[in-house]
Amino acid sequence: MRRPIKLRWRVAPAPLVLWHEATGKVSPVPRPADATSTSGRAGALVIVDVDGLDELVARLRALGYEVKGPTLHDGAIVPGPLTSCADLPRGAHDLQAPGHYSIVTGDDDGLFSWAVGPGSWKQEFFPSSQLLWRGEVAGDTVVFKAPEPPSSPLAVVGARPCDVAAIAIVDRVLKDGSHRDPRYGDRRDSVFIAVVECASPADTCFCASMHSGPGIEEGFDLALTELNDEQGHRFVVRSGTPRGTEVLSSVPTRPASELDLAARSRVLDDASRMMKRSLPFDEVASLLARNVEHPRWDDVAQRCLSCANCTMICPTCFCSDVRDTSELSGALERRRTWSSCFDLEHSYLHGGAVHASSKSRYRQWMTHKLSTWWDQFDSTGCVGCGRCIVWCPVGIDITQEVAAIAASDVAPPLTSASRSEP
């Protein structure tokens, strides 16, 4: 068993491009001679007002990006198109608990006063249902056609740090692995990410213990922290890539003061303290590896419905199924859809399912997510977003299950000296 190490999430920057409406083509944006001006220097902290955030969205749209961000739709905060700050969930707050999610609105003007919604950004790069090719009968032949890729690159404004960390995990598998998924990779390569650090974690969040929030240091083009106090409603903004610097240079900014920096620190410190749930990041992999026969697995199996909600809502799960269908006209379609290790047929092999019981399937999901993921991909598979807790119909809490196993660990913890190095 490899020893987990603290990760530093990295997302490789992609070139800034322009979309030409007349031709539908993209081309690189010429770099200015000084791409590290004082106001937009990579890593520099500046202040952008709410009107400036509107200009940021407008600037990204002018560059040809399809801009998406958090929107309020059907009683939930989900990714949607952004044309201005008016599309953001102003005054919306989420109430999350095991098996419960709801939205309440207040009279405040906060734009990001919520944690995470049911929709993660994985859907934008790895859709739940995706056409791979279609074949149509033309005379005596069959003509195969692949779907056209999106005509414009994507800009994400308002992703949370835990979701950016989740994107980095999936990148490791589908974009940067030995078998690159071209549809995922091509879409990811052009994305612009403006992340907003989290000031309002839900009761179910535990990203602080997974080192994926509430703040962020890497993996973004721009990072924003919303402040709304006696100094006014504003954002502390940092650029993380040259193209982030370029976009920020076209938005009105002013230098961040010591008061602004102190306010940002308080916001992040308070958010960390608000989280009551946690996982033992450095110990959980080995804990589960030596407790595969723990009686807690029987206990959780009595409650688990094998509904697959936890995998469908997870921002890092990437299992999929590929199926061919035919039409009466003779046309054929090959489509990829999300799959789940909770499906009985997922482990079907030589006439039977390897994971035939709910106990086996839940144990497979949880031990893979928190333990054997390290052996496959050199990282954890969990970012602490808490979605699997919220959207479980019976409220199974992954942090409680780990705590229960740890409370009656069948073997003593490995010492640092006895652990094998990665």
Image (spheres, grey):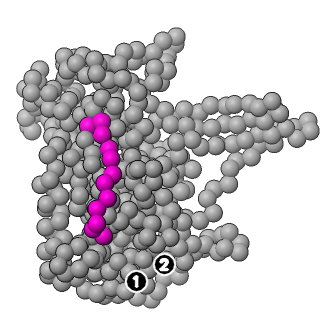
Magenta segment: does it hold 103? Answer: yes
Quadrant that contains the C terminus: top left
Q: Say whether marks 1 and 2 touch (CB < 8 Å).
A: yes
Q: Residue at x 9, y 27 (%)?
A: 407
Q: Nearer the viewer, residue 198 or 382?
A: 198
Q: What amino acid type is highlighted by mark number 2? A: Arg
Left or right position of 124 against 372: right
Using the rendered view, name the quadrant where residue 88 is placed: bottom left
Residue 352 x/y as whole percent: 48, 12
Q: Count residues near mark 2 (Cα–Cα under 10 Å), then give few for <14, some for 14-19, many for 20+.
A: some
Left or right position of 267 against 364: left
Boundaries of the magenta span: 98-109
- Mark 1 lies on a secondary structure that is loop
- In 3D space, how far apart are the residues under numbered discs 1 and 2 (Cα atoms)? 8 Å
- Mark 2 lies on a secondary structure that is helix
Q: Residue at x 14, y 46 (%)?
A: 276
Residue 48 x/y as whole percent: 32, 80
- Residue 251 is labelled as 1
Left or right position of 19 against 174: right
Task: Find disc 2 in the rendering and name its residue.
Answer: 59
User: Is residue 343 at all visible to an observer of this figure?
Assistant: yes
Q: What amino acid type is highlighted by mark number 1? A: Val
Quadrant that contains the N terminus: top left
Residue 420 x/y as whole percent: 18, 36
Residue 196 x/y as whole percent: 32, 64
